[in-house]
Amino acid sequence: MPEEIKFIQPAPVVRDEMGSFQHPHMPDFDQGDGDKCKAWVAEQGLKLMMVSLEYADEAVADRYFESGDPDYSYWEPDRPEGEDWFCLAIHDTENGPVCWWARREVTP
């Protein structure tokens, strides 16, 4: 009998002191786990949207990229247009911080 899929639901966004967040029910994916991550997203029936600090308000982007400080806790990522988007993760990348928004496209 196949294991029942537990669908991820929105959760409060509690960021750490640097500004990072990971949804408490999202699996930990290592760098290079792109295929596993894509499979999980598909299994969850989610649509993802990435928002980058690089394209945020100019003052916010300049503050981060010109300071050399890894703290981006002051950045409030823009929520995509439409309903039911929830935050999956906010983390730093080689190109600066990004936020991953998700919403269910397939009703379980």
Image (spheres, grey):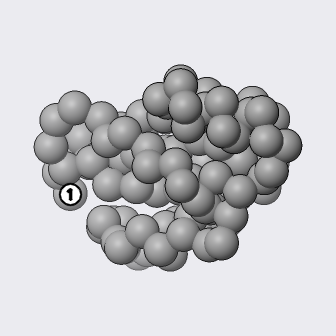
Secondary structure under the numbered disc 1 in the rendered image:
loop
Residue at image location 56% in from the left, 64% down from the top:
21
Residue 63 vs 28, above or below: the answer is above
Disc 1: which residue: 108
The residue positioned 74% from the left and 33% from the top of the image is 65
- Classed neighbour count for the residue bearing mark 1: other residues with Cα under 10 Å, few (<14), some (14–19), many (≥20): few
Q: Is residue 108 left or right of residue 86?
A: left
**To which quarter of the image does residue 79 belong?**
top left
For this rendering, which residue is in front, 65 or 26?
Answer: 65
* Residue at position x 71%, y 56% in the image: 71
Residue in the picture at 54% in, 69% down: 15
Q: Quadrant of the C terminus?
A: bottom left
53 or 7, which is in the foreground?
53
Question: How many callouts does the rendering have?
Answer: 1
Amino acid type at circle 1 is Pro
Q: Is residue 38 at all visible to an observer of this figure? A: no
The reply to whether residue 78 is visible in this rendering is yes
Q: In x, y percent, where is residue 60?
A: 55, 37
In the rendered image, residue 13, in percent from the top left (x then y), is placed at 42, 68
Can you say whether 71 is above or below 80 in the image?
Answer: below
Residue nearer the viewer, 99 or 27: 99
Residue 73 percent across, percent down from the top left: 58, 59
Near-viewer residue (59 or 50):
59
**Horizontal placement of 83 versus 18: left or right?**
left
Q: Quadrant of the N terminus?
A: bottom left
